[in-house]
Image: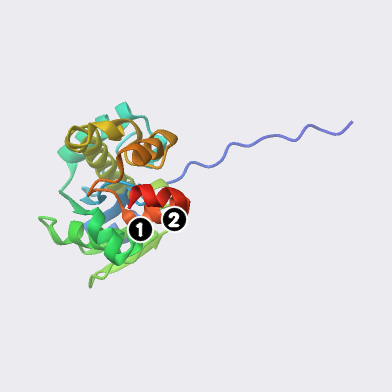
Amino acid sequence: MGKKKQETAAEPIDLLAWERQYWARSIRHIAGIDEVGRGCLFGDVVAAAVILPEGLIIEGINDSKKLSEKKRDELYDIIIAEAVAWSVAHVDAATIDQINIKQAARRAMKEAVETLDIQPEVLLVDAEKIDLPFTQEAIIKGDANSQSIAAASIIAKVTRDRLCSGEWNDRYPEYGIAVHKGYGTKMHREQLLIHGPTPMHRKSFLSSLFPKEEQLTLF
């Protein structure tokens, strides 16, 4: 009988590996950038840019989608308190329909960088390139591989979720925005067929989601 294969734990990811490459070259202002809401039917796409202090380690930070709402809120407060600079930017549904979601997400990221109080020297971006004249790294799964990008992911996610639970839900309470956050859940689709789209729904998304006979109800 052969020996049982020994399981080995995966090596923990160094969330500061990208940042350390630049700190070693005396580059201090490294901005992490990410966006949320790309796949939603309703509301803005929201991006954040965050510059954290050199050497800071924030325990428990990760891709915002992998964290509980309570943990995201806790980390949001820590990031806001510790950041050298941070900013958020929004691009609305009408603009998303005009220029497409990919370009809208890039625009939101660009505006988030441009509104930082401190000009960054390097951008670490979650799998994107931004039309700005800075050194950039487009990191695949960046929110799980860079603390700076993870921080931006959390700031963007908490900002958008709070809009969904507050202002946007108050404006359109019949759609249940606070529950599904604008994503295409069964509940959301059912309310769309009853009430039709609001000015904050992305019409370009709805046309591909519903059959033609149901689109007659929507548009």
Residue at mark 2 = 208
178 over 123 or under it: above or below:
above
Neighbours of disc 2 within 10 Å: few (<14), some (14-19), many (20+): few
- Please say if the residues under marks 1 and 2 sit with CB atoms less than 8 Å apart: yes
Tell which of 27 and 96 is nearer to you: 96
Residue 53, given in percent of the width and then of the height, sits at 21, 48
Q: Quadrant of residue 189?
A: top left
- Hey, which residue is sitting farthest top in the picture? 70
**Image coordinates for residue 13, horizontal then vertical, percent:** 46, 45
Q: Is residue 186 left or right of residue 95?
A: right
Q: Amino acid at mark 2?
A: Ser
- Above or below residue 95? Residue 78 is above
Residue 217 location (% of width, % of height)? 36, 47
- The numbered dot on residue 204 is 1
Label 2's element? helix
- Residue extending furthest left? 117
Residue at the image point whose x is 40% and y is 33% from the top: 187
Up the image or down, 101 lies above or below 143; here it is below
The part of the image, by quadrant, that contains residue 159 is top left
Quadrant location of residue 182?
Answer: top left
**Mark pair 1, 2: CA separation:** 7 Å
Please provide percent x and percent y for residue 190.
Answer: 40, 36
Instruction: Return the mark for residue 182.
Output: none
Q: Residue furthest bottom?
A: 133
